[in-house]
Every structure is written in structure tokens, then in C-alpha cells.
Image (spheres, rainbow, N blue to C red):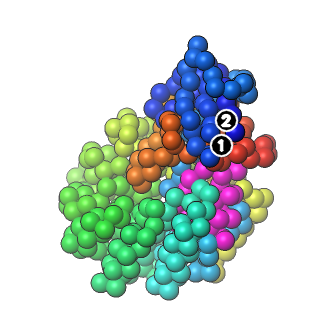
Amino acid sequence: MMQVLKAARVFDGTRMHENAAVSLSGDGRIADLHFDGDSLPAQPQDLGAGILAPGLVDLQVNGGGGVMVGADTDAAQLAHICAAHARLGACAILPTLITDTPLATQRVIAAGIAAARDSVAGFAGLHLEGPHLDPVRKGAHDAALIRPMSDDDLALICDAARMLPALMVTLAPEAVTLPQIAALARAGVIVSLGHSGCSSAAARAAHGAGAVCVTHLYNAMGALQNRAPGLVGAALTSPLAAGIIADGVHVAPECLQVALQMKAQDDLFIVSDSMAVAGTNLHEFTLGGRRILRADGRLTLEDGTLAGADISLPQSLACLARLGVNAERALAMASRIPADMIGAQDRGRIAPGARGDLVLLSDDMHLRAVWLAGQKLPDPEH
């Protein structure tokens, strides 16, 4: 049955439209975008003030709903994490395994393949953040599990990429060879550089070999220096895309503004880097046997090291709005741009045939409603 949603403003993934409407077909897809003055195929539901936008897309989600991605993860747990984030506005996510054992990696890949086979709502693929990183830039990762990429690792990842909707892998140039990066790229892996103290030249060489992205820009990488620009300098001055955590904790507002000014608009997107506590009232959880504490919008190890972020994508959008970022750019950073990063042409946009995943946001970017495959979810708690 056709339904039509009308809002004061509709963002289609690229542009904002005043007094527009979106029609949804019975199969959970978008039928059309209707502009002010168009005849509508059914009586519209007037959503009033606010912005109707594509369902948000998050490419770095370590957990949610009380569950972390880890060695025991199965397809049901991935579905649970996806559902938790859909209620927070992220209708498509890449559940993310941080550095772990080879067996854990194999199990999570198997769970992701099963989730894809079962068409789990909101599951857009996997992100493997490690273990092929620079141990000096480990952040909250377990240094004992960080290691260079072997031939077996390469074969496992390449095979997985052929069976998943999308596979992003964060690696450090120090832990892999350029031929390995090239082989990953040929297999369809989205190679992202991160947790690295590499030089700018090494980052550019990795880009030339097939790396296309940088993971949580500024965090867990060498600082930009006058004669040693490093990965940050390469990310800011090359076509490498970059994810960034817009919470005011991981990246200072001034550094976020630098990235916004330096990067082409379609080369910068936001990620939540969220953990198990997302969508819950939990005050702590464990990560690899270590306590992670939640307080004042921060997640930290007991020694104070940041361990993921405690923010949703709509909260990140509100952070961008407070910095003066216009709504079109901010919303694109949370929808179309990350969707394009993983080749998901039917996500992150409002267009005929796209998935009927939508969010309604207030003008100051507070989440008011979510539709997943055309079905409205229970109203978000405030």
C-alpha cells in the first residue's frame, strides 16, 4: 500500500527541498520524491516542521544495544546491533570488529555472511579495524593482538569481500605491503588507513596502491607537523576520503573545522565509532577483558585512554550544526557520502527505487522519527 510523507523540508541526499513529499511503495522502497505543487499519489501524512532525510549510514559501529562485535558474535547479535542503531537513526551500518584473534575474525566474517544471506535489516557489510595496525598507535586496541598481514590473512579478507555487501578494512601502511593493498582493492575491499604513524609519502603510496579512505581522521595517527605531515597531512591534501568523529571529544572543534575546509565536500563523512552502550543506559562494559567506563559523554579505559565514542549520528549532526555547517553538507556526511563510500547506491538518498529508510529530524538535528524499509519504528526516547 502506497504511503506519502510530507515535510516542511526534504533532503534528498544532495539538495534540500521545501514543502516536498516522499511516496513509499508497499515493498519498502521509495516510489518517488514529489515537489511542492505536484499531485500526490495518495493522501499525505503531514509531518510538519523539520527535515525528512534518508536513513543515516554509519561505517564504524563497534557495538550497540549492550552488545559488542567480538569472537562470539553471530548473525542474531549483528541483527540486534543493527536494530539498536536503527532506533538511533542509523538505518545502515557496518558492524566493526576491532583488533582480535584470527579465529575471532573468521567467526565475525561468517556471521556477516549469514546476516547478508538472511537480509538482516540495516546490515550493510562489515568493517575490520585491525589487527594489521601500528602498535605504537594502538589506541584502545590490544597491542598483543596487533600483527602484520600474512598471506592467510589476505586470502581470508579477499574471499570475504566477495561474499559480503561491503567490506571495509582499516590497516596501517607499516603492517602491510603495497602489493597486499593492491590485492585487497582488486577483491573489492574498501581499504582505509588508520592507527598509523606513517609518513605522508607512505600514505600516498598506499593510496596509489588502492587505499581510498582514512579511519577516524586525527585519532590514533601521528600529529601534523611542519616537516612531517604524516597521515593527517596526506588525508587533508589528497583525494583520500575520511571518516571523522564529530563529538567534540575525539576531535577539537578547530581541527574539525580545518578538515571541513580542507576536504572536498564528498570526501568527508561522519562516523559514530559507537560501542556496546549505544542505545542503552549502561555505565560500563568490557572490551577484551578490560573495563570501559562511560561518563560525561566519554568512553575510556581505566587509564583514561579513549575507547570508542558515546555519540549517535544525529548528535554528531547537532555538533556540526553548532559549528555552523549547513544542513545540506552535514546531512550528506551522514547519509549519501558514506553510502557511496561502500557502493550502496540504494541507501543514503531519497530517489525512486532506493530503500525506504528515512529519518525525521528537527531543525536543530534532534531525531524525531525513523522509518526502516517503509515501516515507522517506535518514536525515539528523549
Whether residue 114 is situated above or below residue 326 in the rendered picture: below
Identified at 49% across, 79% down, the residue is: 105
- The residue at 74%/47% (across/down) is 377
Is residue 275 or residue 219 the one in the foreground?
A: 275
Judged left or right of residue 327, residue 291 is right
Q: Secondary structure at mark 1?
A: loop
Give the mark nearer the N terminus: 2 vs 1: 2
Classify mark 2: residues with Cα within 10 Å, few (<14), some (14-19) or many (20+): some
State the residue position of label 2.
Answer: 2
Query: Can residue 196 be seen by looking at this rendering?
Result: no
Residue 310 locus on image (x, y percent): 64, 55
Q: Residue 95 in magenta?
A: yes
Q: Is residue 137 left or right of residue 27?
A: left
Bounds of the magenta segment = 76-96
* Image position of 346 with respect to 331: above or below: below
Q: Do tag 2 and tag 1 residues touch (Cβ < 8 Å)? A: yes
Amino acid carrying label 1: it is Gly
Asked if the magenta segment contains residue 54, the reply would be: no
| Residue 177: image location, x then y, percent | 24, 74
- Disc 2/disc 1 C-alpha distance (Å): 6 Å
Question: 148 and 283: which one is in front?
Answer: 148
Residue 64 x, y percent position in the rendering: 66, 62
Q: Is residue 176 left or right of residue 25?
A: left
Label 1 sits on residue: 26
Between 58 and 295, the one lying in front of the other is: 58
